Image: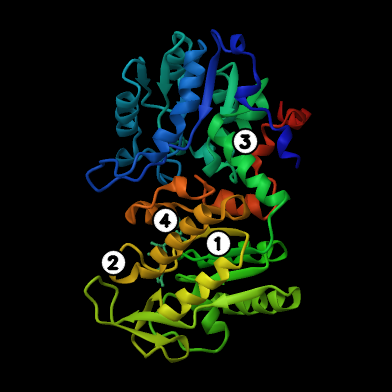
Amino acid sequence: MNHAAVPTIAQMPADFWAGKRVFVRADLNVPQNEAGHITDDTRIVETLPTVRYLLQRGASVILASHLGRPKGAVVESMRMAPVAKRLQQHLPEVTLYAATEVCSPTVHLQATQLKPGDVLLLENLRFEPGEEANDPALAKNLAQLCDVYVNDAFGAAHRAHASTAGMAHQVTHRFAGLLMAKEIEMLSAVLNQPKRPVTAIIGGSKVSSKLSVLSHLLPKVDCLVIGGGMLFTFLLAQGQSVGQSLVEADLAPEASRLLNAAQQAGVRVLLAEDVRVADRFAEDAQTQVVSTESIPDGWMGLDIGPKSIAAIQAQLSASATVLWNGPVGVFEMDAFATGTRAVAQSLADLTESRGASFQSILGGGDTVAALERFAIAPQRFTHVSTGGGASLEFLEGRTLPGIAALMPTTVTASLV
Ligand code: ADP
Ligand code: MG
């Protein structure tokens, strides 16, 4: 797909927006603690430029997002009310209405009564079973709320849901928001003309979902660094014992195939040579550094060791582009944060010292949370993506349904 052809809101003349009702699909899926308090409002803040852009040009905005995984039913603890409250704090001058439903005659009425400069925040999209099922009826209902559709939810663009794909086909005017446009611009530069060598660091704990990504990434990279919980399934595939470490044993054959494919493709695979193991999953566990060949029974690997850190740092220095998704250890506990902190720090330093000859592209919710924990500003990297799975699928070269739906040519007879 030619990503340069994706229409964006910035391409329209300023007077286009006056009096328009604009549906903005945003990613407001913020983390909350047990008390329902928002612990990090980055995603809300990142949506503000698009919302302000539209309001300042005389549009009214219908804002919608999913929050958590309510699986098609109303879950009281996943209502958007806390998001509405935080949004209002960021937009004190704006009249903001919070709907208590996603679609209903009441919501429709609320939408039609919006005045230029007003915002209506819809209830959690995933309260509707039709959202994730991409139900045409829900898509049509949502489409009827607005004159213009804007997608700014890059983090949800790899899903073909009613609000990310289905409804876009039913609205005449559709655009990428400012955040979506920036993601597309930054990531397509890396996808189309990556500076080589390219190294991808893949960590984290979602072994099953990331393994398939790895095989697609293989043709695009020169070196694959595998860290975090991913590592142990690979070690198991090599016949090593991994003690109590996180593994998905049934995926070991797939990991094995991937190692073979990498060898055939001439891609270097860097697996940790040492790990910090713990006798239990706790901050105050007993720990020791061992070779990955001798993980003791009953112990679990929770971080990469110093030799592995040094090997990764050498590889990063020898790279021109680094893609990083997934922490290389349990960074939430100080005792196991060393590897992740070292990777983040090295990447920030290289990005600063090497200027245009080094690009660092980061993605993944927990990877971004790690930066925050280490107080390493996202501005110190070339691009920190707001999408984890979406950025990986984009970099694999796949067409994301949420982006494809914005293209002018995708109106098909069956969907209208
Ligand atoms: P991201 O959100 O960046 O894509 P994931 O969601 O895949 O990353 O994984 C993040 C989680 O992986 C973190 O909570 C981290 O504690 C965990 N993790 C990292 N290394 C290990 C490990 N060795 N064992 C268990 N969990 C790990
Ligand atoms: Mg995660």
Name the element at disc 2: helix
Determine crowd level at label 4: few under 14, some 14-19, many 20+ residues with C-alpha closer than 10 A. Answer: some
Q: Residue at x 43, y 52 (%)?
A: 368
**To which quarter of the image does residue 151 belong?**
top right
| Mark pair 1, 2: CA separation | 27 Å
Disc 2: which residue: 334
First in sequence, mark 4 or 2: give its number: 2
Amino acid identity at mark 2: Asp
320 is higher (above) or lower (below) than 28: below
| Mark pair 1, 4: CA separation | 15 Å
First in sequence, mark 1 or 4: give its number: 1
Disc 3: which residue: 165
Question: Residue 366, which numbered label?
Answer: 4
Residue at mark 2: C-beta within 8 A of ligand 1: no
Nearer the observer: mark 4 or 2; the answer is: 2
Disc 1: which residue: 209
Q: Report whether residue 160 is seen.
A: no
State the image coordinates of residue 155 (x, y, percent, origin top left). Answer: 52, 44
Are the residues at dot 4 and dot 2 in contact (C-beta closer than 8 Å)? Answer: no
Question: Residue 185, which numbered label?
Answer: none
| Mark pair 1, 3: CA separation | 22 Å
